[in-house]
Image: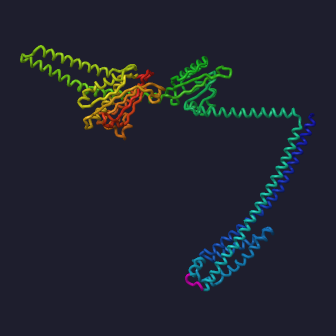
Amino acid sequence: MSDLKIKDISLYSFLVLALGLILISTILFISLNKIKSLNNQLILITNVKNSFLEMKINSEALLITKNLAETSKLWSKSIEKFEKEIILLSPVRNKKIEDLWYISKKEITDIKAIINSKLLEPQNLHEKSLLMLKGEMFALEENSKMFLTIDSLTKKIEFLFQYEKFILDEFTKIDKNDYTYISRQITLTTYYSIFFLLFIIILTVTIIFIMNKKVLKIEVKLMATQNSLRDSLSELKNSRKLLQNIIDSVPASVFWKDKNNVYVGANKFFLHDAKCEKQEDIIGKTDYEMPWKDTEASKYISDDNSIMKSGIARLQIEETQTNEKNELIKVLTSKVPLFDINNKVIGILGIYIDITEKEKIAEELFQKDKLLAQQSKMASMGEMIENIAHQWRQPLSFILTSATGIRLKNDYECLDSMFLKESLVGIENTVNHLNKTIDDFRNYFKPDKEAKFFKIELVVDNVFSLVESKLKNKLIKIVKNIEDVKAFGFENEFIQVLLNIINNSIDELEKIKSENKLIFVKAKEIEVCGSEVSKNVSKCKCVEIKICDNAGGIPKHIIKKVFDAYFTTKAEDKGTGIGLYMSKEMIKKHMNGSITVENKIFTHENKEYMGAEFTILIPAEEYVLEKKE
């Protein structure tokens, strides 16, 4: 197809479009003029309707007003206003309204005549409404002329209400008809416009279709390319904005550099550290232009070059940095190299968080736990000294008695070799028992450097040997049911935990008046889900140790507090409130275990008891335990 023909088709297309637009514009102009004319009529009839409503309101006020004369004047004025405006209506509308208005005017004339008559003047109608006056006179002077006049007046006003309702209904019909007419005009205008618009569109499409296919294909390709580029650009902008929002939401300082160690972007937290307000302030700068010291900048650049050269990320690096207050802070940094599509390093991405406050808090917590552990150890030493005193009282008495017996027999020259030998053997055995007691107490205070396997039954027996004298003196019976099982952990710490619980049971049993004071210890191996023991293990075999007494249990309002630091129900000189707290810390942190307590009702030898039951779970298998300081 030649250029001339293409131009001709374009010209014809333009002429057809212009003609169609003229036709549509003409139809719209005519329709809008009709609607405008009708709208003027609507405004006029609305004004007439408003005047009528004003008159109707004043008519209704005649019955209830306490100032009939003033209301009558307002009513008359609204009637005059309505009559003036009704004349302006179109003949068709005027005829319908006028027919109804003619009947109403007769009632209005009669009402005015009665209101203006002198008969109503003495009735104080500026103080009472017609309805009130009618009610009073009905009760007093039902057949009087005045009552009949007022009764006639009220009835005429009520008749007028009915006529006014008919007029209002007519106004409503007029509104409905006008609305229908306008809707029809708008619908017709829309149909005509759509018809001609579709005609023009179809004609235009037909003309364009006739044009050269090659030109059309090129245009389509160009449009597709343009749209694709626009969409790609929009997606790229949205992606960059989304990525920046995500990076800004990360609760850490994030930055990225090119391979020359020049900053090309950062999130809002890094901008704050670098004393920059926006991205543009940091782009193109190096670490030497940042607020940190030159020595720090040199180290950062050296590390970054090393990472970009090796292509290997470095994670969780502890570094120092000078902050905006010129203070030296500790940061935990991770850096990864950035690669292009050819897998070549083009830069580096870094992220760091300020751990200064975290380390400070961790150190404070460590010192606090260390102090609590020391206090717990000292409290345990005090209890051990008391236990030593109980343990040694009887053996020392035996040694003293034996020595006294030997001396007396020697003084009276009746000491025989058999008595001397038996006494010396008894003293020797007692001294050996005292030495063993000392060894037991010494072993208790030796710190465990490494976790190891230990037999639960031996540990329990060791614990009860340490408090043997207390148990005998306070008539407390031990009931054991311990399987042949081993646990993995720190033996002496576990002994300290058991001692804390046993000593608490002894103290509570001392308060009750009972011939049967009992402490039960059970132990067996079970398999549990790791979450029941520690977050460090998933599933494991554990030793379950249950320690229970029959002292009546722990009051409900404090049972959840017994593992809190410094919580105690004992007097200040008898308890520190850290024994059970440290017990939980040792079981949980050092042995990957758990410890809980609940009140339990149980039966022993056909008799029911109630007491506190402590349940300890510790691994029966070897795991990596927390290193003790």
Quarter-of-image position of residue 373:
top left
> Seen in the image, is 226 located left or right of residue 357?
right
What residue is shown at x 17% (from left), y 24% (from top)? Answer: 397
Q: Nearer the viewer, residue 455 or 264?
A: 455
Q: Where, quadrant-wise, is the C terminus in this rendering?
A: top left
| Count of numbered marks | 0
Q: Is residue 43 above or below residue 399?
A: below
In the image, residue 142 lies in the stretch drawn in magenta: yes
Can the viewer see residue 367? no
In the image, residue 350 lies in the stretch drawn in magenta: no
Residue 224 at what x, y percent from top left?
78, 33
Q: Nearer the viewer, residue 294 or 129?
A: 129
Residue 199 at what x, y percent from top left?
86, 47
**Range shown magenta:** 139-143
What residue is shown at x 56% (from left), y 27% (from top)? Answer: 351
Per the picture, the main secondary structure of the magenta-coloured stretch is: loop
Residue 137 at what x, y percent from top left?
57, 82
Q: Where, quadrant-wise, is the N terminus in this rendering?
A: top right
Residue at the limit of the structure toward the front, as seen here: 606
What residue is shown at x 69% (from left), y 68% (from top)? Answer: 53
